[in-house]
Amino acid sequence: MLRNLLHIRSFIVGGFIAEAVRCAVRKRRSRYLARVVSGCLILATLPCLLLMLYWGDLYSLIAPGILLFVGVGTILGRLR
């Protein structure tokens, strides 16, 4: 149940980021825009992943992993 809820939230977060970027660039397209935004999401999540890996166990990496996997996929799909 919790993983399904996390999965849905990841879609929402990825979609929100993609729409905010699309609004910020005023619906212009760029070849590398989706890749840059995806890279920024990965870089923003990296410190959290490192802290969880240092202080927690491997199971604590599930939530950020789902966020990265689904969020990056949503951003790449929405900004293409």
Image (cartoon, rainbow, N blue to C red):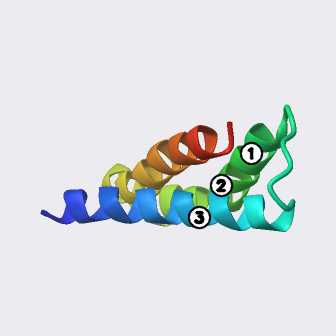
Residue 55 position within the rendered picture, expressed as x and y whole percent measured from the top left: 48, 66
The amino acid on which the numbered mark 2 sits, given as a three-letter code, is Leu
Helix, strand or loop under label 3 = helix
Counting other residues with Cα less than 10 Å from the Cα at mark 1, is it few (<14), some (14-19), or many (20 or more)?
few
Quadrant containing the C terminus is: top right
Q: Please tell me which residue is depicted at 68% across the width and 44% down the height of the picture.
A: 79
Q: Nearer the viewer, residue 58 or 24?
A: 24
The amino acid on which the numbered mark 3 sits, given as a three-letter code, is Cys
Residue 67 position within the rendered picture, expressed as x and y whole percent measured from the top left: 46, 55
Per the image, the residue denoted by label 3 is 48
Q: Residue 30: in sight, yes or no? A: yes
- In the displayed image of the protein, which residue is found farthest to the top? 31
Residue 46 is marked as 2
**Disc 2 to disc 1: CB gap under 8 Å:** no
For residue 12, side relative to residue 3 (left or right): right
Gap between marks 2 and 1 measured at Cα: 10 Å
The amino acid on which the numbered mark 1 sits, given as a three-letter code, is Gly
Q: Please tell me which residue is depicted at 43% across the width and 56% down the height of the picture.
A: 11
**Disc 3 to disc 1: CB gap under 8 Å:** no
Q: Please tell me which residue is depicted at 12% across the width and 63% down the height of the picture.
A: 1
Residue 51, by quadrant, is bottom right
**Disc 3 to disc 2: CB gap under 8 Å:** yes
Helix, strand or loop under label 1 = helix
Per the image, the residue denoted by label 1 is 39
Residue 76 position within the rendered picture, expressed as x and y whole percent measured from the top left: 62, 39
Identify the mark nearer the N-term, 2 or 1: 1
Which circle, 2 or 1, is nearer the viewer? 1
Gap between marks 3 and 1 measured at Cα: 15 Å
Identify the mark nearer the N-term, 3 or 1: 1
Helix, strand or loop under label 2 = helix
